[in-house]
Image: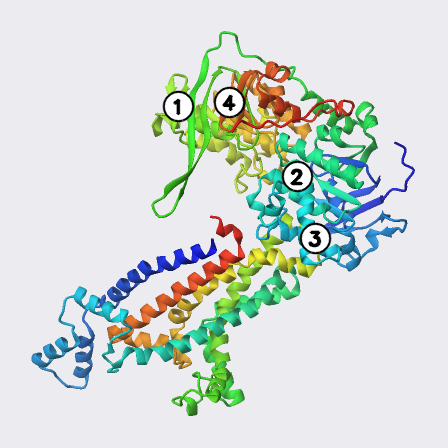
């Protein structure tokens, strides 16, 4: 049953990813001009002028003179062989540029997700069970402040506090000495040391909204007759709340896996720039600005596939958690 | 019969208050009663009389603003007396008693079981809370107790989820869970109210058998005097948080002392026969509605191409006539298609085939315009007066809506008409600015009726209009409908699972079973001389509100040939 479901979902991913690749390609092509126009404009700013012949030459070299669909099929054909193409701007294979950034993005996303859950779950349960208590009001107030504060502002505040009161630079994910060093245990530890700040910054608003969702969902469930049944069985209050209503109210938690990734990448670009995080966001933004199509395309595609995989994981978990989903 | 044994549970002067902003508001006023081993004590009363809260208080599970502020609950299973009110409501002592010594089952079998845990895991949990057994042993015990409550294939059912069961099966599973630790006392809070009569009869039998087998005391909460007559040894009548009368079953039924008890009994007994005030349709009255070979299939579609994998014949060739001014009852258990027939006639559903001839006009082929016109004349009343009124509209807005939508009245004239309608259904027109939550269930159903007759319809389709109401209010609403029928010459299609209500109200009745009409005819004739075996089975399940006739009737279940 469950295996058939997973298989079905995985098979569905194939046409879906194909569609995503088309959309990604079209989106990148949507702004007028191509990388060369941007490049020429940039050269023009420093008073270098290219004659038409060398422009045509360059255009042919980059393959930009071919019709769109040919470019697209070339790109996809290479993709299927694992070749993401060359970045125009960096003159490097895209895969060299992308993987480390994607890895760090994933790492950061995952840490943020864990942080969000670890904080939102107990607080959400507490404020539902102790509705209108002082604890609930405090959690709610902090939650609303968290929701209302823009991430980058929070980042600036925390950085300010870090620099002024603790004398450390909390930007980035590594200390300068590890920036370009090869991976080692020390570098990983350094990463962990730097991770907490972006995690808090990126996770706060998600945590706040999850607390609210958890609280509202659990409040609905707490008055359901099955909770009374469990109580009448002789279960202790803590055990029964955890086993029954919380379990039912858990669905939105699982669903967050799906949206945390795209949220982090698209919504967190500003924060990532403020904190100078070496994640995918800023590089993707730059690639889009300079119409560096293969680089941008690789990012869009990878992020979409991560989102799709995230959705798949959350759907599978939902099925495992809630038998009602299984039988639909 | 004499039981000189000590009562197993004594409730003494129990007082319960809800702390409100305005102060403490008492909901139980010093009630006292005893429960005995092997005996069934029925607690009767209308909604809001404090029955359910009493049950919860016994387990020290008072809902939050409530607080026990007087009296004791003494539990004495084996010679040592425990005062349940003195225990910490969250402490281990009371938790040992909950489920272990005193078990409880609830009204809504749909929502009283967890939707995301298997039946088995919930029963196993109950067993392991109170008995020191391994998981495997507990599982075997769970299968054992599922077998005891007569659930087919218990070793498979144990791994099923609640939503895979029918209402009756769920209630059996609830009973299994409650009895899994062999409690001394079983508290059942309206366990059969949400079930069909046939299922109700089975559950009552089952509880009786299990009681004989295990010898527990049962406290059975109900508002249905018929059920009381079927199962009670002792009866406790509650009104507004007071015990107004208690005593032996025969004493209560033969010589009720308190006027409230008499009122409850009267309401049930009146439903034992056709209403005196019933106005029969004229002999030569013409047909207002003719339904011929009505069919509706629900198709379950699956997969990418939406292949039809399963077809349910909800209505499978139903035909009947309805005379001007006549009330036709449609009776059957849940899933028989009775509601669907009503909705097809109102064209809420689009039937697949058949003829619906309303006054010479075929509603099957009618276009939107024509339907809009007939919908002024064909109105519906629904079961749940709580759900069928918009809580954000005042009563005036609710009743005026059909008049406004059809552009019939506005301004002062509209207000006058609403006032007149309210008077007609027996409500004070001065209340028209209030919202539905300010009204009781019976009053709300009157508002629903007022809305239905606002357009002076000719045919009313009433879908279980009294099922959600207390018995005493039931007759009031029926009397109201009857009065309107006489005054306005209304025709009724009256859908119900309750034979008593049909007998009281309907001229003719159609018995539906699995989408087909099993039998149709004059109500009295069908009830006194049923022909179809299904009708016989249905009638045999209706509780008789006379304890002296208990056990005189053979109950049987009809199973259609496959």
Q: CA distance from mark 4 to mark 1?
A: 15 Å
Q: CA distance from mark 1 to mark 2?
A: 41 Å
Parent chain of label 1: B
Mark 3 or 2 closer to N-term?
Answer: 3
Residue under pointer 2: B150
Parent chain of label 2: B
Local secondary structure at mark 1: strand
Front one among B120 and B139: B139
Q: Describe residue A288's horizontal placement relative to residue B332 as left or right.
A: left
| Image height of B150 relative to B226, above or below | below
Mark 4 or 1 closer to N-term?
Answer: 1
Same chain? Circles 3 and 2: yes
Q: Describe residue B436's horizontal placement relative to residue B380 as left or right.
A: right
Q: CA distance from mark 4 to mark 2?
A: 30 Å
How many neighbours does mark 4 have within 10 angstroms: few (below 14), some (14-19), or many (20 or more)? Answer: many
Front label number (1 vs 3): 3
Mark 1 or 3 closer to N-term?
Answer: 3
Mark number displayed over residue B517: 4
Residue under pointer 1: B354
| Residue B381 horizontal/vertical position (percent) | 53, 29
Same chain? Circles 1 and 2: yes
Residue under pointer 3: B126
């Amino acid at each position: 049953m469950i295996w058939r479901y997973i298989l079905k979902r995985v098979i569905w991913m194939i046409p879906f990813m194909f569609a995503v690749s088309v959309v990604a390609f079209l989106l990148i092509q949507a702004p007028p001009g191509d990388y060369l126009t941007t490049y020429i404009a940039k050269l023009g700013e420093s008073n270098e002028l290219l004659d038409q012949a060398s422009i045509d030459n360059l255009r042919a070299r980059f393959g930009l003179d071919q019709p769109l669909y040919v470019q697209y099929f070339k790109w996809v054909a290479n993709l299927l062989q694992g070749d993401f193409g060359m970045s125009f701007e960096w003159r490097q294979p895209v895969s060299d540029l992308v993987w480390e950034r994607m890895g760090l993005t994933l790492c950061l996303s995952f840490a943020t997700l864990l942080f969000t859950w670890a904080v939102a779950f107990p607080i959400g349960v507490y404020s539902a069970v102790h509705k209108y208590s002082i604890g609930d009001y405090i959690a709610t107030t902090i939650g609303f402040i968290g929701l209302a504060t823009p991430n980058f502002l929070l980042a600036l505040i925390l950085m300010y506090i870090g620099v002024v009161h603790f004398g450390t630079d909390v930007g980035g994910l590594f200390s300068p000495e590890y920036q370009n060093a090869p991976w080692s245990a020390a570098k990983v530890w350094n990463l962990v040391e730097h991770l907490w700040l972006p995690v808090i910054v990126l996770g706060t608003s998600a945590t706040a909204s999850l607390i609210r969702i958890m609280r509202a969902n659990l409040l609905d469930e707490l008055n359901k007759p099955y909770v009374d049944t469990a109580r009448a069985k002789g279960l202790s209050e803590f055990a029964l709340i955890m086993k029954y209503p919380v379990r039912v109210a858990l669905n939105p938690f699982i669903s967050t896996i799906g949206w945390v990734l795209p949220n982090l990448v698209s919504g967190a670009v500003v924060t990532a720039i403020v904190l100078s995080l070496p994640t995918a966001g800023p590089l993707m933004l730059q690639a889009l600005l300079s119409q560096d199509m293969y680089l941008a395309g690789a990012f869009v595609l990878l992020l979409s596939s991560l989102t799709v995989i995230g959705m798949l994981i959350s759907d599978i978990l939902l099925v495992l958690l809630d038998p009602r989903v299984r039988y639909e | 019969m004499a039981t000189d044994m000590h009562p197993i549970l004594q409730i003494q002067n129990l007082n319960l208050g809800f702390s409100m902003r305005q102060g403490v508001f008492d909901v139980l006023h010093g009630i006292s009663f005893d429960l005995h081993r092997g005996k069934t004590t029925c607690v009767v009363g209308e909604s809001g009389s404090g029955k359910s809260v009493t049950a919860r208080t016994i387990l020290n599970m008072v809902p939050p603003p409530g607080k026990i502020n007087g009296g004791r609950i003494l539990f004495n299973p084996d010679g040592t007396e425990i005062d349940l009110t003195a225990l910490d409501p969250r402490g281990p002592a009371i938790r040992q008693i909950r489920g272990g010594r005193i078990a409880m089952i609830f009204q809504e079998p749909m929502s009283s079981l967890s939707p995301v845990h298997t039946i088995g895991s919930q029963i196993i949990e109950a067993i392991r809370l109170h008995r020191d057994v391994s998981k495997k042993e507990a599982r075997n015990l769970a299968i054992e107790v599922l077998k005891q409550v007569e659930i087919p294939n218990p070793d498979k059912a144990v791994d099923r989820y609640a939503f895979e069961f029918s209402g009756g099966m769920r209630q059996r599973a609830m009973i299994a869970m409650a009895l899994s630790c062999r409690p001394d006392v079983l508290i059942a809070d309206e366990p059969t109210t949400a079930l069909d009569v046939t299922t109700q009869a089975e559950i009552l039998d089952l509880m009786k058998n299990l009681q004989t087998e295990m010898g527990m005391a049962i406290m059975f909460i109900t508002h249905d005097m018929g059920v009381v007559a079927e199962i009670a040894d002792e009866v406790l009548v509650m009104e507004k948080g007071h015990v107004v009368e208690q005593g032996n079953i025969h004493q209560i039924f033969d010589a009720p002392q308190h006027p409230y008890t008499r009122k409850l009994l009267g309401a049930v007994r009146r439903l034992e026969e056709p209403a005196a005030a019933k106005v029969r349709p004229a002999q030569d009255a013409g047909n207002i509605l003719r339904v011929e070979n009505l069919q509706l299939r629900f198709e379950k579609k699956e997969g990418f191409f939406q292949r039809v994998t399963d077809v349910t014949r909800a209505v499978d060739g139903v035909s009947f006539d309805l005379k001007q001014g006549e009330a036709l009852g449609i009776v059957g258990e849940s899933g028989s298609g009775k509601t669907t027939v009503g909705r097809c006639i109102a064209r809420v559903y689009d039937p697949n085939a058949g003829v619906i001839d309303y006054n010479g006009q075929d509603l099957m082929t009618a276009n939107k315009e024509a339907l809009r016109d007939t919908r002024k004349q064909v109105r519906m009343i629904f079961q749940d007066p709580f759900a069928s009124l918009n809580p954000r509209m005042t009563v005036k807005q609710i009743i005026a809506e059909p008049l406004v939508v059809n552009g019939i009245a506005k301004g002062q004239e509209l207000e006058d008409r609403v006032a007149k309608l309210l008077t007609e259904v027996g409500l004070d027109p001065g209340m028209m600015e209030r919202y539905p939550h300010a009204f009781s269930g019976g009053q709300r159903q009157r508002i629903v009726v007022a809305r239905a007759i606002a357009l002076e319809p000719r045919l009313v389709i009433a879908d279980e209009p009294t099922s959600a109401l207390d018995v005493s209010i039931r007759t009031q609403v029926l009397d109201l409908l009857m009065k309107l029928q006489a005054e306005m010459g209304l025709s009724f299609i009256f859908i119900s699972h309750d034979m008593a209500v049909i007998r009281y109200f309907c001229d003719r009745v159609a018995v539906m079973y699995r989408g087909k009409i099993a039998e149709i005819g004059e109500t009295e004739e069908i009830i006194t001389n049923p022909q179809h075996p299904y009708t016989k089975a249905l009638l045999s399940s209706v509780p008789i509100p006379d304890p002296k006739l208990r056990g005189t009737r053979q109950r049987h279940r009809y199973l259609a040939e496959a």
